[in-house]
Image (cartoon, rainbow, N blue to C red):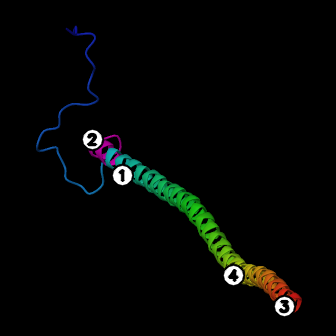
Amino acid sequence: MYSQSSLPLAHGGVASSSSFSFSSEPEPGGVEESLLQLVQDHHQTSLRLREVTEKAKKDAIKKAARAAELMVDAVNGGVQESFVNEKRIEYEIRALTATITRFTKQTDQWLSVTHSMNSAIKEFGDFENWMKIMEFDCKNITAAIHNIHQA
């Protein structure tokens, strides 16, 4: 696969166990320093990612809260409009009830007046009939007296 000339060359030889030291300071350019740098880079990347994620989370929460607020406002607007309409309808019902009561009283008065007029008209008819009967009786009496006086 790789030819001898294309293989990467190692930067140093393999350290023997006797030449390997356990110092607290990593050697510059050594494996420990590279690993330590990788860990630090990973840690910094993780912190940045966590900050970005936290910021995105807070932003999403704010946007969700705003969306919820807008939805509640939309629903409340409809509810408020319904409430106002309900109050208007109740006011109209009270006004119509008062009008109906007034018309009922007026109709009852008109019925009373027309009943009185009908009674008066009947009495006129009865009086006229009584007058005709009296006139007929008077004519009969006058004719009877006239016949008696001539006989």
Callout 3 amino acid: Ile
**Start and end of the magenta stretch?**
27-37
Residue identified by numbered label 2: 31
Look at the numbered disc 2 and give the secondary structure of its residue: helix
Question: Residue 140 versus residue 68: which sits nearer the camera?
Answer: 140
Q: Mark 1 points at which residue?
A: 43
Label 1 to label 3, Cα distance in Å? 149 Å
Magenta stretch: residue 99 in it? no
- Residue 110 in the image: above or below residue 10: below
- Residue 108's label in the rendered image is 4
Q: Where is residue 93 in the image (x, y as percent from the top left)?
A: 63, 73
Asked if 14 appears above or below 62 in the picture, the reply is: above
Q: Distance between the residues labelled 1 and 2?
A: 18 Å
**CA gap, disc 3 and disc 4:** 54 Å
Q: Which of 68 and 31 is in front in this view?
A: 68
Location of mark 3 (residue): 145
Q: Which of marks 2 and 4 is in front?
A: 4
* Residue 15, x across and y down, in percent: 17, 37
